[in-house]
Amino acid sequence: MKFLTKSFLLICLIVLSACSSKATQQDVSETMSSIDSTIIDMHTLSNYKSVSSSHIHLDIEVDFTKKIVSGSVTHEILNPNNENHFILDSKNLFIEYIEYDNGETASFAYGKVDELLGTPLIIDIDSDVKSVTIHYNTTDKTEALDWLMPEQTDGKVSPFMYTQGQSIFTRSWIPIQDTPGLRITYSANVKVPEGMLAVMSASNPVERNESNSYNFNMPQPIPCYLIALAVGDLVFAPIDERTGVYAEKTMLEDCAYELEDMGQMVTAAEELYGDYQWDRYDVIVLPPSFPFGGMENPRLTFATPTIIAGDKSLTALIAHELAHSWSGNLVTNATWDDFWLNEGFTVYFERRIMESLYGKDYVEMLALLGYQDLQGSIIALKPDLQLLKLKLNGLHPDEGMSDIAYEKGYFFLRLIEETVGRDKFDVFLKDYFNNHKFQTIVTEYFVQYLNDNLLVPNDIVLNVEQWVYEPGLPNNCPSIVCERFNDVDKGLVSFHKSSDVNLIHASNWSTHEWLHFIRKLNPETTSEQMKLIDDKFKLTQSGNSEILAAWFEQSIRFNYRGIDAALEKFLTRIGRRKFLEPLYTALAATPEGKERAISIYEKARGNYHYVSFNTIDKVLGLNI
């Protein structure tokens, strides 16, 4: 999306002047309504600005034999201007027929196919049409669905299916106005095979029924990328009165132990920024092919099994997804160019939750690791992708899902906190979430809201424009002091001087200290030194996926072949893109390594979700 014009920014400044330092939700709603017509989402083909869904109802069946979802979706329509067409996003769907609310068959047509965005579905309507029902089914090209064979699950008995809607994949399993700028409520009836349980980002059952049919309701309005479904041999374990975990029976006990602090996390989050608005907070631990660490689907976070380390060391991810219940789910980026409004806020909030539970030292380790990731992204990314306010017109929104949104956004917010003081910033954020709940916003609006309600009243001058609209990292980026990493650095220096592995005193190291150690290995490290480390600390046999992935990446660089069998096992089992992309990239850096990578990938690709294999195809230069 191109940068908004100076005239638009002037409009924002004039209209947003209504937001005083004591802005109310009513003030904000009126302001947002005033500028809504100027917000353009370049990643939807729908006409949601003029005709929109207010509620959808899904009546679908999940067929594991045909690997399709089939049935209908009913859209309740808001048409204030009496438009003649209701236009939805669709991609690789088969539309059987469409009917109006009076039962008559509706006339519809397809618009021009866009390789990136799909095909607009254009339905004829008039002022009397209050709803339309679309009968459809998914196809073998549907990008949102991942169909797993029994052997790809932990239990090895039953198949499994889950959806992934973010960023623009919901249109490939539901014909819908696929934009984060529109919030809708939804309900569903889902029919599944005997012996399986369906769960959604909505009110959920906790046990199977004999009808094999499950009803769902999401009364709070959400953007459609948060509509999610999973079906499998699932069981449920409560954590406390409003939190719990779903998983396959074979891993439920381990998952419940790992996530037993979830209730405390919800309480800690509420103490910071106000009441939890979604009734329950549950987590489903998915099979290993899930392409992300977690997905913040409201009421039911979808999580990777790679966080189940046995020692609760990777549960910051759960704090992150929980934080999205405020930043992202409650207040949402109106376009994917504004993605940092979801993720930067969430990383900041996540680390505040973790600090309240585990202390400042713990969080500073997370922050320093995040800073290292951010520095790597700035080196790797083109300038246009180093901005907080992105320009993604013509690009897939996934191109903007980098450490820039997450970590640069976090350090910008941390700078504000350190400048104005934590107490004032907490009051500002709590008001921000409350005043904008169940709304969508853009970056330009937030910048003005920040100035009007925090910076100007406190006589604070910051280089906000540089942080938001320019590449790189400004000079006033907060610095991280991490004493626990200083001890790791001393061990590294001693080892590289002598190759004496006994000088590495790691008996009490956390996951984060190990990650820092592995990342900071001297570029001149030899394969022999890698073997010494591995023989002493058994890193190749680690049960911690974060440590494994970091160790594998460095081992590839330093040509340590002791990892080969474990690396192939890891790559053929785990589908989390965060791990796959750097590992395949490291392998592909040499002709021999690329040959190894392609050999492994041929076996592994079928285990990956579209999100992951689409990325690795590009890394390896394959046209499959």
Image (spheres, rainbow, N blue to C red):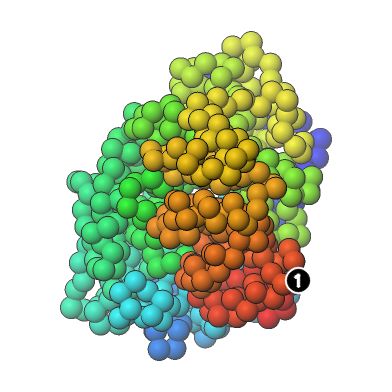
Which residue in the protein does label 1 denote? 591
Q: Position of residue 241 (x, y in %)?
A: 19, 46
Is disc 1 surrounded by few (<14), some (14 to 19) or many (20+) residues within 10 Å?
Answer: few
Q: Is residue 610 above or below residue 546?
A: below
Q: Position of residue 69 (x, y in %)?
A: 44, 79
The quarter of the image holding the C terminus is: bottom right
- Name, please, the residue furthest toward the bottom: 65
Q: Position of residue 564 (x, y in %)?
A: 55, 69
Q: Is residue 190 above or below residue 429?
A: below
Residue found at x 76% / y 60%: 394
- Front-most of residues 134 and 272: 272
Q: Position of residue 202 (x, y in %)?
A: 34, 58
Q: Is residue 610 left or right of residue 235?
A: right
Residue found at x 37% / y 53%: 309
For the image, the number of numbered tags is: 1
Residue found at x 49% / y 67%: 566
In terms of image quadrants, where is residue 297? bottom left
Residue found at x 38% / y 28%: 359
- Name, please, the residue furthest toward the right: 6
Q: Is residue 286 left or right of residue 389?
A: left
- Front-most of residues 537 and 68: 537
Q: Is residue 405 left or right of residue 305?
A: right
**SS state under label 1:** helix
- Name, please, the residue furthest toward the top: 459
Does the image show residue 122?
no
Does the image show residue 324?
yes
- Residue type for callout 1: Pro
Q: Is residue 506 above or below residue 422?
A: below
